[in-house]
Image: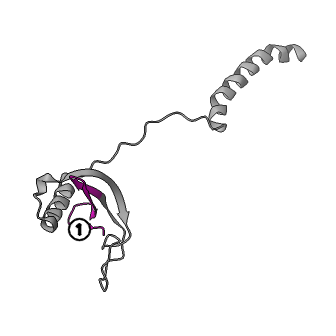
Amino acid sequence: MSHQISKLLPGLLCTSLLWLGLVMPAQIGTAIAQPPPPKKVLPAQVANAVRQDLAKKTKIAPGLFKVKDSSPQTWQDGCLGLAKPDEFCTMALVPGWQVVMSHGNQTWTYRTDSSGRAVRLEK
């Protein structure tokens, strides 16, 4: 019987080492580096809606505003988290954008829905 074990031992040892080599890294937290997720691009219609609103408020031509920064956001209500006094807002999560526009040294921060139909200037 010990002769049979001595014949099987090298095979069992190799199989065990192979198994440990394949399974252990995942168990001890070895991570494979992954690229960061791609940055979402601000839709042109959202940028244009913000430019148009800002142009009305400032009397500056819309084409002079630059998108300084933008990031996708989810707002807690239909007023994009910027309800006015005595304003009623739908109570639903609204996917959209926070957009920072600039002209010269001035900047303005806007909140929008995902299509640019709802646009609000942060104060």
Q: For the image shown, how many numbered marks are present on the structure?
A: 1
Q: Position of residue 102 (x, y in %)?
A: 23, 54
Q: Is residue 115 magenta?
A: yes
Task: Tell me if residue 8 comes above or below residue 25 in the rendering.
Answer: above
108 sits to left or right of 7:
left
Indicate left or right for 121 with 91 as reference. Answer: left
- Residue drawn 63% across the image and 32% down it: 25
Q: Residue furthest right?
A: 2
Amino acid tagged 1: Ala
Residue to which mark 1 is pinned:
118
Between 103 and 53, the residue placed more toward the observer is 103
Of 4 and 118, nearer the camera is 118
In the displayed structure, does residue 96 sit left or right of residue 6?
A: left
Magenta range is: 99-123
Tell me the chief SS of the magenta region. Answer: strand
Q: Nearer the viewer, residue 93 or 52?
A: 52
